[in-house]
């Protein structure tokens, strides 16, 4: 009985470490490019993962991994890398208050994919849990979008005042040119608005695929070894993103204080991944993933203590709904 319930403890451990990772990562990217920080953090995760492989002595099993299992481990790593690429691209061109909640909606998608591909059952109680999680996510997204909308209005007013000043200072500019420029800017804004949404949705989809592919890939493989293998793939993609954006020269410019937080966040990420894939190996993905997403509780608690951030009543209600839905699925 105890062994059967151990996956729950591993899932809770994953949530705890993931929540701490978010806080440490936020402290480590005040001046450091987020893509560079991610690549450096992945090095720490990789080292930590292979250290655990040496501790449990599962390194010799790598030659015994079947081709199909190895393929799914690699695909899981590629899905993680793709999720990060979409996520950071969405953050680059979109509003973070809109991007993050959409990325977190991968929980519901994972439950659906687990039902379709892993044939995990969805009882009435579990279905109710899914509805609560979806409703809670919507409430948190809605509130954040309201804040974002207010910020956009302020920016719009500033842009309007700026345009009026330019018109008064540049009397020689014709009305036709002004109209053409505004029309072009509006067109670019529409394309941009659609792009960040597509990237954010892609991040959520790939994050869900990561869980499903990871569940399949760790069948018959020691979880620490599986995590180490897929982390190798993520490392390659993370550094490929750094070189693709031409940020490799900024690695030497990382402040020592932030580098310390980045490394600590890497250790926390490694602990979260090890617990997460151990939980996936022993428990159902449709329950492990929602429990892991409870890391938001840890993040909210530390954000209140460290940064003094508070949840609005509506966001608090959404968080309570997510917790209630997860508890229903768990018990």
Image (tube, grey):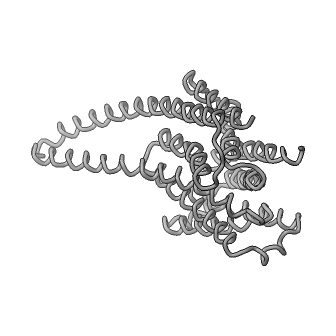
Is residue 73 positioned above or below 320 on the image?
below
Q: Position of residue 303 (x, y in %)?
A: 66, 34
Residue under the image location 25 percent in, 49 percent down: 187
Q: Quadrant of the C terminus?
A: top right
* Residue 3 appears in the picture as rendered: yes
267 left or right of 133? right
Q: Position of residue 253 (x, y in %)?
A: 61, 60
Please identify the quarter of the rendering in which residue 150 is found: top left
Given residues 257 and 137, the one toward you in this image is 137
Given residues 121 and 182, the one toward you in this image is 121
Q: Quadrant of the N terminus?
A: top right
Q: So how many labels did they put on this image?
A: 0
Is residue 319 positioned above or below 43 on the image?
above
Residue under the image location 55 percent in, 69 percent down: 240
Please identify the quarter of the rendering in which residue 312 is found: top right
Given residues 38 and 196, the one toward you in this image is 196
142 left or right of 174? right
Q: Position of residue 285 (x, y in %)?
A: 68, 49
312 left or right of 28? left
């Amino acid at each position: 009985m105890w062994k059967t319930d151990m996956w729950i403890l591993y899932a809770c451990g994953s949530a705890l470490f993931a929540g701490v990772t978010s806080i440490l990562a936020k402290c480590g990217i005040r001046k450091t490019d987020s893509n560079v920080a991610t690549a450096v953090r992945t090095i720490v995760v990789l080292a930590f993962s292979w250290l655990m492989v040496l501790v449990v002595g599962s390194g010799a099993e790598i030659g015994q991994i079947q081709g199909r299992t190895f393929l799914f481990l690699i695909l899981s790593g590629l899905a993680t890398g793709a999720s990060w690429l979409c996520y950071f691209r969405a953050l680059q061109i979109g509003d973070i208050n809109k991007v993050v909640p959409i990325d977190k909606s991968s929980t519901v998608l994972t439950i659906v994919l687990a039902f379709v591909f892993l044939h995990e059952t969805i009882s009435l109680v579990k279905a109710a849990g899914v509805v609560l999680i979806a409703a809670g996510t919507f409430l948190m997204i809605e509130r954040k979008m309201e804040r974002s909308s207010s910020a956009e209005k302020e920016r719009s007013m500033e842009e309007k005042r700026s345009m009026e000043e330019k018109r008064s200072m540049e009397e020689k500019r014709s009305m036709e040119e002004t109209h053409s420029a505004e029309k072009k800017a509006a067109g670019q804004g529409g394309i941009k608005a659609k792009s960040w949404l597509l990237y954010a949705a892609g991040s959520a989809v790939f994050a869900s695929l990561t869980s499903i592919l990871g569940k399949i890939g760790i069948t018959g493989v020691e979880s620490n070894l599986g995590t180490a293998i897929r982390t190798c793939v993520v490392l390659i993609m993370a550094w490929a993103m750094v070189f693709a954006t031409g940020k490799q020269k900024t690695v030497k410019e990382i402040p020592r204080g932030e580098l310390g937080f980045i490394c600590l966040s890497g250790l926390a990420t490694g602990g979260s991944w090890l617990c997460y894939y151990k939980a996936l190996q022993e428990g159902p993905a449709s329950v492990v993933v929602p429990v892991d997403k409870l890391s938001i509780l840890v993040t909210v608690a530390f954000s209140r203590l460290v940064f003094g951030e508070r949840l609005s009543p509506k966001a608090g209600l959404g968080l309570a709904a997510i917790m209630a839905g997860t508890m229903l699925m768990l018990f």
